[in-house]
Image (tube, rainbow, N blue to C red):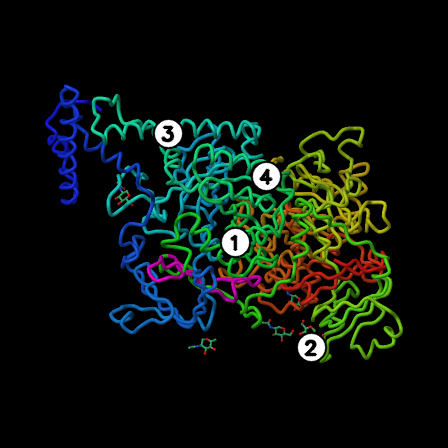
Amino acid sequence: MDILAVNATDGPAQRPPRAQLFRLLTFLCLALSLATFTLFTNWKAHEAAVVPLNAGDILQKCRWLDLKPAPPPGFHKRTNSDRYEAGTSPVLVKNATIWTGRVSGLEIIKGDILLNKGLIKAVGTVEGRDLSGLEDLVTVDAQGSWVTPGIVDIHSHIGVSSVPLLRGASDTDSTKGLVQPWLRSIDGLNTHDDTYRLSIAGGVTTTNVLPGSANSIGGQAFTIKLRSTKERSPSSMLLEPPFTFNGTEVESDHPLRWRQMKHACGEEPGRIYSATRMDTIWTLRQGYETARKIKDSQDEFCAKAEAGLWNELEGDFPEDLRWEALVDVLRGRVKIHIHCYEAVDLDGIVRLTNEFKFSIAAFHHAHEAYLVPDLLKKAYGHPPAVALFATAGRYKREAYRGSEYAPRILADKGVSVIMKSDHPLSDSRHLIYEAQQAHYYGLSSNLALASVTSTPATVAGLDHRVGFVKTGYDADVVIWDSHPLALGATAKQVYIDGIPQLASPHTVAKPESFQRVPKTPNFDKEAANAVKFDGLPPLAPAKPGDDRTEFVIFSNVSSMYRRSKGRVEEIFSAAEDGEAGVVVVKRGRVVCSGTSAACASSVRDVSAEEIDLEGGSLAPGLLSYGSPLGLQEIQGESSTYDGVVTDPLTGKVPEIVGGDDAVIRAVDGLQFATRDAYLAYRYGVVSAVVAPKASGFLAGLGTAFRTGAAHKLIDGAVIQDITALHIQISHVGVPSVSTQIAALRRLLLGGAHGELGSVFAAIADGKLPLVIAVQNADAMASIINLKKQVEEVTESRMRITFSGGLEAHLIATEIGLAEIGVILAQSRPPLWAWDERRIIPGPPLSKATALSVLLDANVTVGIGVHEQWPWAARNTRLDVAWAVLDAGANISKADAIALASVNLERLLGVHADSHDDDGDLIATKAGSILDMEAKVAGIISARSGGVFLV
Ligand SMILES: *[C@@H]1O[C@H](CO)[C@@H](O)[C@H](O)[C@H]1NC(C)=O
Ligand SMILES: *[C@@H]1O[C@H](CO)[C@@H](O)[C@H](O)[C@H]1NC(C)=O
Ligand SMILES: *[C@@H]1O[C@H](CO)[C@@H](O)[C@H](O)[C@H]1NC(C)=O
Ligand SMILES: *[C@@H]1O[C@H](CO)[C@@H](O)[C@H](O)[C@H]1NC(C)=O
Ligand SMILES: *[C@@H]1O[C@H](CO)[C@@H](O)[C@H](O)[C@H]1NC(C)=O
């Protein structure tokens, strides 16, 4: 900036007048009065008047400093959305049950919705005059279906951790420094992420795309709508570009919009930079100190300029492109999203906000926030919201004390609760499932729905246009096939900016009960315990054998399922018998089941514990397979983990274990009493099979164990020492797939020696199953050929199971003919890596699902869990129930239970006679084990001779 002595009125004349005449006039008046003032003060100081040539610009800049983000004036009177795509037909949705998001999520309107010009034009009653003159009006009869605002995902990496994940499309974490407020996620946003359409199918319409958490300040986040645009560019996906985005300056009709920024603390910034918590907070303080100095010097500069003290100004208006975003934070114009887990981290950030006087929008992940609600209230300005997962936890140390009750505990304390995805880490397509689970564990239904719609919209400063079904808002709405909090709720149609996103949606018929808000069990005691025990409430099953559990009568039982000859059968049904039944259990064995008349003799004269199951059910306990459950407590901590086996295909197995012929047994590394195992037990997963963790091709021998056992030496803790041999065929970190197949061929045709030789001889003979972790259909096809080839030589049938199986549906018939079983490790297929990307998405994108296709091909199917998620074992019952719903099917409850019990046992080599009698039975209250509304009431264990009450 040059300082020149000029005639004051020359200032604005140097610059072309701005568009609006009134602004020019305002400016002239201001400049004139300023000049007068300047002349007067300078005259007093006996100095010449010195007003810079660009005084106008400077004063404009100074005025901008005080602006706060807000919708443009008249925004709510807009008649067209700025995102309206010409040619979009108006839509009238008739007869909807509309959850609007208003009145704390308590307003429900039965009626119609009119969408036009990218906006919601009317909600409830649509008047004739609203419709007059609308050409091409599309009328949709919702037939009473639930309609909600489009889902808003406040924490996603969609487009920056672009899927399929390839080296060339990983733009989430910069490695250039810990503090980088100048980075912008939009600069890495890939428009070809294959998951946009999947997330939309899950009802997600708006997404906040955050940089990663490897830096204490990872950069600026940008909020996009997920639909494709005519322009096909990242910029055109932006919901609302912040004003500085493309160099456009503030316009009166285009004022400041909220900016978004990512911060992180705790373990993550340490990952790349080996920063300690002390380092991380220091880098934040250093960054904020830099920004504060710039802000102060701007304020000082402007105070002088505005006072006309031009002579006292030295140099240019103080600014720095690298720090302008952080200066904006201090000016209250940025929504800060901060990834922080533990009390120590939350505390450090709360101190930071008070030291530098800025507020934060939300703590993300924040697994310990529910333990420190009062601390949150000390944050500068206002308490932050908390953005959570529902049941994902314990995957690293700072997530160890996470609780499924956190959403309701925080809500009870008045904290805004958001459920988020962290996509692609967890699939944002199923963000509504996070809300469903939060609701199940006690968050009220209005807040659960708000947690993925209106609350994130409000917290991100976008509640003037998204997150609500309200006249004048963006036309982003979802029509659901059931109540959105019912398990498996599927979008029948999703509108973004009024444009229908699903070309030919498929949904399946669901029971009428799915149309109401699901009932939830009472978890008051559990929630109180979570806080009382600082996040680690005792989970060990109650001791059996005390008198109370010797003799138990379950009354008001609506159905009972048992194992029978390798299958599950329904042996009692109130629906058929016309009255609720009783089940009498003595010392862990069922002595009678049926009508109370039929069981009258076995209950006579004995004082027994009676448990009213409220229409509940008894069923065989479930089995979990796929994760390191039983070998690991905390994924990120090696000392809590059995570890990884040495792979003979990629390394040299030490001679002392037998060299390359060694076979490692999972049973030798079993760890009992982990929190994930106990939680699984409490949700009906009474046993698990686990294989040694492979680093490459060869894993080792699997084992079956009880999840409720306290240690290995307890009778029955290990169900079966050796179950099957496990290997994996993959594209990652090992020699070529063809090399892996070659190794398998050689081993099966007698090329192995020693212990490995005997194991493969047993496999070739069909005496020991071979479980192959494989996702890619071409690799599966090679194995099918190899199986034929080997069987021709050995003249026996091998027992092979594919686990993973994301692409199995592509060759389902061939897999069925080869008599290979499939364990779907992820029953809701995520789209993730290249070699497993050909998933079958299921409703609403396809009628068929992986399960339905495989069952149609007569394949024996089991349902497992994600390879890295032992915490997910507890959700097995929901995975099964959901997969069966989606398969649209004719799968009886008995066959459904088999998917995660007897089928898995057969596929994994667990002998039927490993279970005495029935194995454990699970008693559930208020529904069967496959009903989300139900809660496990007790586990009946013949081996332990009692009933474990949960
Ligand atoms: C709305 O749909 C429900 C369910 O199909 C139906 O019972 C009701 O009659 C419909 N109402 C109107 C006004 O069409
Ligand atoms: C910058 O963005 C604003 C707001 O979207 C838009 O009006 C303007 O045309 C854009 N300018 C350029 C050069 O793209
Ligand atoms: C059985 O439970 C259902 C559901 O709680 C309840 O409506 C019914 O009254 C109960 N029946 C008896 C006989 O207790
Ligand atoms: C599956 O089994 C049924 C009954 O055994 C048979 O009719 C059908 O053809 C089989 N389907 C396939 C694809 O093999
Ligand atoms: C479902 O099963 C029943 C009885 O097993 C059969 O009659 C019916 O055709 C099946 N429906 C479908 C859609 O497969």
Residues at marks 4 and 2 touching, judged by CB atoms closer than 8 Å: no
Q: Picture coordinates of residue 365 (x, y %)?
A: 55, 44
Q: 290 or 859: which is nearer to us?
A: 290
What's drawn in magenta, residue-wise? 469-496
Q: Picture coordinates of residue 870 (x, y %)?
A: 67, 47
Task: From the image, tell me which residue sits under label 1.
Answer: 431
Q: Residue furthest front?
A: 44
**Mark nearer the N terminus (3 vs 4):** 3
- Mark 4 → mark 2, Cα distance in angstroms: 51 Å
- Mark 4 → mark 1, Cα distance in angstroms: 26 Å
- Mark 3 → mark 4, Cα distance in angstroms: 31 Å
Task: From the image, tell me which residue sits under label 2.
Answer: 575
**Mark nearer the N terminus (3 vs 1):** 3
- Secondary-structure class at tag 1: helix
Q: Quadrant of residue 738?
A: top right
Task: From the image, tell me which residue sits under label 3.
Answer: 322
Task: From the image, tell me which residue sits under label 4.
Answer: 343
**Mark nearer the N terminus (3 vs 2):** 3
